[in-house]
Image (spheres, rainbow, N blue to C red):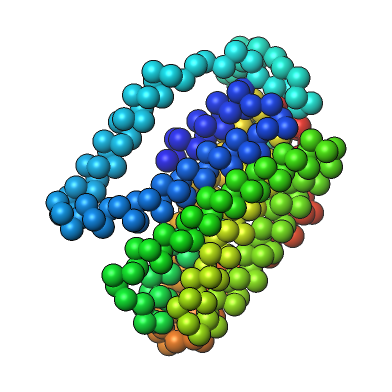
Amino acid sequence: MGVVFPSIHSILVHWIPVHERSRAVSLFTSGMYFGSAWGMAVLPQLIARWGPGCVPRAVGLFGLAWLALWSRFANRPARGNHADGSLLPAGGSAKRRGEVPWSQLLRCVPIWALIINNFTFHYAFFILMAWLPTLYDSLGADSSRQGSLKMMPYLVMGVCSNVGGWAADALITRKFGVTKTRKLLNSAGFALASIALLMLPGASTLGNAVGLACWAMGALALARGGYSVNHMDIAPTHAGVLMGLSNGAGSAAGMVGPWVTGRILEGAGGGGVAAWHAACALPAGLCTAGAVVYALLGTGERLFD
């Protein structure tokens, strides 16, 4: 996955016009969420029939099958996109293809706003992904229902990811402005996720917890219509490099977030309500901070070739 996301951004920037990029990235991203939901529904049945060893084999076979389809039907893009949506030869000049202005990229404040928001998104996302089953257990969830309960937030994420992408493209097409659109989707998504995270520990029933988890993860997916597409706005030629940088921060959040949450839960007395409030307050605060940072420092303008 560390290679896939940057590669997809590098491909889409040459295939997709500016006013269609949001829905393209959102559709690509939603496949991950719908796939996760499908896996949670199907893989337990495979395990029950053939044992846990079948899971990596099944996933690997699906990957090889998709690689074969991609290699057979994917065409090399003939053109790329200027910032205004006009087209240029794919890949640009040899100079632009071969050189990455690392020092300029790393000194660019809007790029750091992207990196911070990717970290924020994945910190909240991985905490929910890793710790929701424990929260469900504390509310008396039957283990036989865990698969369907965990599946629902991913289905909502898949839908909301596409909603955010289509909404962003619609606003850009109506001349709302790329910068305003990215900031609106990003701020709205993270603000709504922050509210849901603060409310989640107070859920008194399993149904309420599932609903708030769907709210939080759906709002996070909505925010992808902001920061996640922004790599292609800022530096189309280097969109894959930027996604690699920001998604690296997201991967770091995936390593740190669940561990920190475990330590918070232990330090606050285990699995009680107070402990969950403490554990959810940090990602909620990060979502708020990420929204503010991006609103102040983000941009939809093209800063690099």
Quadrant assignment for the C terminus: top right
Q: Which of 156 and 125 is in front in this view?
A: 156
Q: Residue at (81%, 46%) from the top-left corner? A: 180
Q: Is residue 91 above or below residue 135?
A: above
Query: How far from the left and from the top, in percent, is residue 236?
Result: 66, 28
Q: Which residue lies furthest to the left in this view?
A: 50
Q: Residue at (76%, 19%) from the top-left corner? A: 86
Q: Residue at (71%, 30%) from the top-left corner? A: 18
Q: Nearer the viewer, residue 268 or 103?
A: 268
Q: Nearer the viewer, residue 222 or 304?
A: 222
Q: Residue at (24%, 45%) from the top-left corner? A: 56
Q: In this view, does 99 lie above or below 4?
A: above
The number of callouts visible is 0
Query: How far from the left and from the top, in percent, is residue 95?
Result: 63, 14
Q: Residue furthest right?
A: 175
Could one spot residue 102 in this view of the protein? no
Query: How far from the left and from the top, in percent, is residue 125?
Result: 51, 59
Quadrant assignment for the N terminus: top left
Query: How far from the left and from the top, in percent, is residue 54?
Result: 19, 47
Quadrant of the rendered structure where residue 277 is? Answer: bottom right
Could one spot residue 226 in this view of the protein? yes
Q: In the rendered view, does 22 fall on the left or right side of 3?
A: right
Q: In the rendered view, does 254 fall on the left or right side of 121?
A: left
